Amino acid sequence: MSPLPTFDPGFSTEELTDLYSPESTVTALLAFEASLALALADAGLAPRAEAEATAEACGSGVEDPLAILASTWETGTPILALRDDIGGGEWFHYGATTQDAVDTAQMIQARSALSILDAHLVGIVTRLRDLTNEHRHQPQMGRTFLQDARPTTFGFRTASWLDAVAGHVVELRHQQSLLPVQLGGPVGTGDAYGDKGSEVVDALATRLGLRAPDISWHSDRSGVLALAQGVERMTRTLARIGNDIALLASSSIAEVKVRSGGSSSMPEKQNPLDAIRAVAAATACGGATAMVTTAPTAQLDRGIGGWHVEWLALPLVFQTAGAAAEAMESCLDSMEVDTARMGAGLEAATSDNPQIDAVLAACEEILGQQPHSPR
Amino acid sequence: MSPLPTFDPGFSTEELTDLYSPESTVTALLAFEASLALALADAGLAPRAEAEATAEACGSGVEDPLAILASTWETGTPILALRDDIGGGEWFHYGATTQDAVDTAQMIQARSALSILDAHLVGIVTRLRDLTNEHRHQPQMGRTFLQDARPTTFGFRTASWLDAVAGHVVELRHQQSLLPVQLGGPVGTGDAYGDKGSEVVDALATRLGLRAPDISWHSDRSGVLALAQGVERMTRTLARIGNDIALLASSSIAEVKVRSGGSSSMPEKQNPLDAIRAVAAATACGGATAMVTTAPTAQLDRGIGGWHVEWLALPLVFQTAGAAAEAMESCLDSMEVDTARMGAGLEAATSDNPQIDAVLAACEEILGQQPHSPR
Amino acid sequence: MSPLPTFDPGFSTEELTDLYSPESTVTALLAFEASLALALADAGLAPRAEAEATAEACGSGVEDPLAILASTWETGTPILALRDDIGGGEWFHYGATTQDAVDTAQMIQARSALSILDAHLVGIVTRLRDLTNEHRHQPQMGRTFLQDARPTTFGFRTASWLDAVAGHVVELRHQQSLLPVQLGGPVGTGDAYGDKGSEVVDALATRLGLRAPDISWHSDRSGVLALAQGVERMTRTLARIGNDIALLASSSIAEVKVRSGGSSSMPEKQNPLDAIRAVAAATACGGATAMVTTAPTAQLDRGIGGWHVEWLALPLVFQTAGAAAEAMESCLDSMEVDTARMGAGLEAATSDNPQIDAVLAACEEILGQQPHSPR
Amino acid sequence: MSPLPTFDPGFSTEELTDLYSPESTVTALLAFEASLALALADAGLAPRAEAEATAEACGSGVEDPLAILASTWETGTPILALRDDIGGGEWFHYGATTQDAVDTAQMIQARSALSILDAHLVGIVTRLRDLTNEHRHQPQMGRTFLQDARPTTFGFRTASWLDAVAGHVVELRHQQSLLPVQLGGPVGTGDAYGDKGSEVVDALATRLGLRAPDISWHSDRSGVLALAQGVERMTRTLARIGNDIALLASSSIAEVKVRSGGSSSMPEKQNPLDAIRAVAAATACGGATAMVTTAPTAQLDRGIGGWHVEWLALPLVFQTAGAAAEAMESCLDSMEVDTARMGAGLEAATSDNPQIDAVLAACEEILGQQPHSPR
């Protein structure tokens, strides 16, 4: 079985590695197939009992999920091997095409991935809120182009970080609410369902807790791109904060301290390990996103390779993003502020900065909301 | 004066070239400065008469706008040269930093650029709606992986295109509504305005018709990235449609004809010129977007170069996007459908596809909305 | 243990998955450490017997290689855990820093990866040569912008493909000959070795069969970028050939046939599975390359994250490139040419095209060379 | 006429702006056409006198070069308008296709652009050599992950920079020697020249001082990619050096001073203007390179848009690279080293570092070579 390449643990998290295991992936494919059978019954196309039998067969899982997935590159689809394994009868995959199953499975996994990211981001938001409250009057030199400029406060700085991260939480929750099912059959038209196509799509979406799109999107990957790019932007913010913390923790500034890794040659050295990981993982996320933004656009009703690269890219986008977020949580958890050194030579800020209040208010709104729960 | 490189006219449009001329850029900078002075009066920080004198000075324009802009790389900012030229008194640029003026000017120009794009996209949406209505029962072979699959209709195909383009219209109108002013002064805190910071920002935003952000965003470029990536995604859809049209117009398929350019060696050849331009311009837009998505993240309160690249990138994102959209309008305008050849050997579709109706309904909503008008 | 994400087998090959297993990676790290100890003896810095004892300890391997690698993100380096496991005495990792070991290990693995790619490429070159010889007079319509243009021959087409692939073979063999060791110690200066620094580096390079660089390259990743981009360009050529084959195999042209995958809904359909895989893997390779080309440049003597992303990126570059090459071999192996259909209505080419001869001659030179053998 | 977008002067240099003016571009196209006519005579295909008349006509230039170029997007090629303007008779563009002229013109301009870059890089190499000689024993703290590590010398640091830049000089001179002519006619086979195809290509290459390729490369853009990526890598090194200088010039370290731009709000501030410009321009160069590395691969004998984007991308790659190099020269010119502060608390390095000598020796070789001179 093929492991992630060298030094991998840093570029994913345990939860996300599990989410994209062969087991979980086949489970997501089967969730599509089971819900499709039941949706056919909902729309009156399949007898209820038969549909339930199909769904039950899907619920039993498969013995060798990796073999199912590996068959894709032998036969062109994992569905034939899946059907061989599951059985499932006449209503298994009825009227559907491989891409319907695979795209919907990706959306099911993306929903969970977004929930995992959300939990990390809420952790980051909470820490940044607390730092902002604690340090809103703590003077610090403001630095532009790395030159001392005018005084700011450390709380203003953390509020700036908080504002950016909170914006990503809102954006990614929005992305989560947009995740669509895919169901169009061989050329997207849903012909097998006659005039019941919309009903089947709606029923499928309801059963899976995803959105019913107006039309199938086999060749339109705009939504996938928007999703990946939304995640990518979030990681860039984390990379920026990580880099800022590395600067503030640098020997020359040394206003904060964070959990540090050692060095093989200088054991006492304070290397900002989590910041490094956040930057590295965010960079990887950018490359994974580039896989989808630079993929060949689909030709007519299904594309040559430009869609298939998402099978690697989307899991990688989420895993690297999770790594960056996990690292940032750890980094902030461990942060100690040297308030004396930070404020040296500066007067304490006397007035409250209203921008900080605006950011904190928006933050509370986010923390009060219930995010979509993963299934 | 430096022209766009070789063969340029294809990578912009007249309107967008004008929008990003030195004249228009300096005008946008002065719009910021004028509105700032008046906003200071609105907030009670500046005497109304003096503020109006400043605004009036800004309204008179400058003699050599390119020289103003070129001074940036000599002195580090265009504002010193601008102030020398304009005068404007005590309240000119009061409490502001260069990035406040430049970022706000970019947002002013972006608003206009989005309106220009919107007009092109509405043109494309209208043509696609008409094609969809006309050809919804016109049979056509569906093709996946370039292999004949099952029959579809040409109207279903154009509805798929329409759905994607309409989604971008909605997204870019949303992006337009989010464009913020920038005002934070040297380190973003707005210290010069005491406890009136939020009032000044609000007044500035109201005067310019932009959004008032919770906190200054000198180092947080997430919004700029989202904007550029939203435009990039739109161009990718146009590239896809252009490529599809080139395929349908290919000698081997030849189901549609479009305006064609000749060849220096084969004058009679039917090269799908507009599709080519759309693909080329969309690719360029992706590269221009990469300038901002791969830029170094800002260090602390202002970054080293990662912000400055936006001065080239954002205009280029919009100009290339405009070129792609203009080309696609022209391409669709000229499209002739060979219905006999397209439907040969296929039965006419008898039933209405409800997906098409859903897309058309969403399309009408978009066409009925009044987009933001540019100023 | 973390598997590659979903649907993985298509994005690597068995050999490359093995090459980048935790076992192989730790073996490469230990090859560095063993050779360093011996090089210290070569340069007269370490007693020969002690150095050999260190080398022997390194040769025995470790029990849990993944745990060694995973410790990186806990302690900041895999070397501490490695030393704990191996022992190795005073001369283990003497004067070196973590990056020396990791970078050299990457180069050791890259050499093997390039040899694996070379074998695939030689396979492709051989098939293309044979196709060129067989079909050099086989007429085919030339198609520009997908429009019929003037006749060409199928052998000219395969010679064009061959020329491009052969160029990559030459380039990647050159890249292989440039792979350097890394050895500079904490800040790159090699201070621990006194005036013997160059001797140690030379001895290390000789022992490992790598190049001795003029100066350590901890912060200069130009060579890594050149390597990744050279591989990326090769995959783009494979993607182009794959796309061309998909076009020639399309239902509308149908001049060639290739091994095809089925469809979950249309079992008889001829989907060009290998071409699809080649395009998808090449796209992934481009994204993996973007991880290093867009990584933050290193700050001073070692960078924050921009180096670390190579730990994921380089393996991914090679694995996806191997997948593309394996797919292309399979695709060409299975290709059948419908000469009657291809030549229909065209006259046979009567004269020999000298460009074909030039390409074939260059090809024979490549096939006659002995590539670097992996160790 | 369309100017480069806002704030442009920083993203090009005067020389490079001139090189890519419409005038220079049409001149390059005409150089191709003139040399082709003469090459036809060289190969015995055209009467010498007629060929010379064609060449003479090409030498006279055109009145409105921008109009010639703009016609491309109306008629699909600039050659028809060029022929209308120039006349040139039977042998003008004989047997050639538009892409032959445009690609060769790009290579002619690329050769000049590389010479312009070479001059800047030689300037940088010279300055770095001098700094290395001057400061090879000047102690400085080595900093890894922005943490103080072990002492190095400033001369070792500049030698590291020098090594990287010198490598790019060698690489780009190599790239310059590879620049090929393009000549294949409508489908690349050079059919119009019968069995004289190779002779015409050779004669054309000799006359233009470019390389004669084995086979036409209309659809194989590997060489263009390698060229752009070679330039991109060079700019990344300049961005790294720029960023390092900004760090060393930061208020917290302040070991060097460079020419600085002011601030609109803090006139006394020392913003490292040239470093900022180098980083911004290098980032732009990366985006321009992405235009070609992510362009759709060509379909069969000529591609849909993927080639055309080079018309914008290549000029932009070179212009932004020139800007980065010009900025770096200026930055190094202005650099003052605060040796007391830099060496504070550190002992002077007593021994010579042999790595420095190796780098200096390689540097002298480069400075002693005569680069290709532009024409």
Image: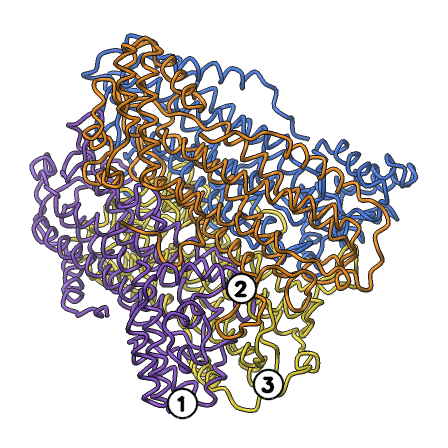
Chain colours: A orange, B blue, C purple, D yellow
Residue B247 image position (x, y, % from top left): 29, 32
Residue D155 image position (x, y, % from top left): 56, 81
Q: For this rendering, which residue is in front, A129 or D366? A: A129
**Callouts 3 and 1 in the same chain:** no
Give the number of the mark in front: 3 or 2.
2
Quadrant placement of the C terminus of chain A: top left
Label 1: few (<14), some (14–19) or many (≥20) C-alpha neighbours in 10 Å: some
Question: Please, what secondary structure does the residue beneath circle 3 have?
Answer: helix
Mark 3–mark 1 Cα distance, whole angstroms, equals 31 Å
Q: What amino acid type is highlighted by mark number 3?
A: Glu
Relative height, residue A287 to residue B330 (above, below): below
Q: What amino acid type is highlighted by mark number 1?
A: Leu
Q: Is residue C195 left or right of residue B247?
A: right
Q: Residue at x 52, y 27 (%)?
A: B169
Give the number of the mark in front: 2 or 1.
2
Instruction: Using the image, tell me which numbered label, if any, was put on residue D134.
Output: 3
**Callouts 3 and 2 in the same chain:** no
Q: Which residue is labeled 2 in the image?
A: A261
Q: Which residue is labeled 1 in the image?
A: C45
> From where the camera sits, is residue D66 visible?
yes
Q: For this rendering, which residue is in front, B93 or B149? A: B149
Residue A290 image position (x, y, % from top left): 43, 46
Mark 2 in CB contact with mark 1 (< 8 angstroms):
no
Mark 3 in CB contact with mark 2 (< 8 angstroms):
no
Relative height, residue B257 to residue B110 (above, below): above
Q: Is residue C139 left or right of residue D146?
A: left
Instruction: Using the image, tell me which numbered label, if any, was put on residue A297.
Output: none
Question: Please, what secondary structure does the residue beneath circle 1 have?
Answer: loop
Residue C93 found in image quarter: bottom left
Residue A310 found in image quarter: top left
Image label count: 3
Q: What amino acid type is highlighted by mark number 2?
A: Gly
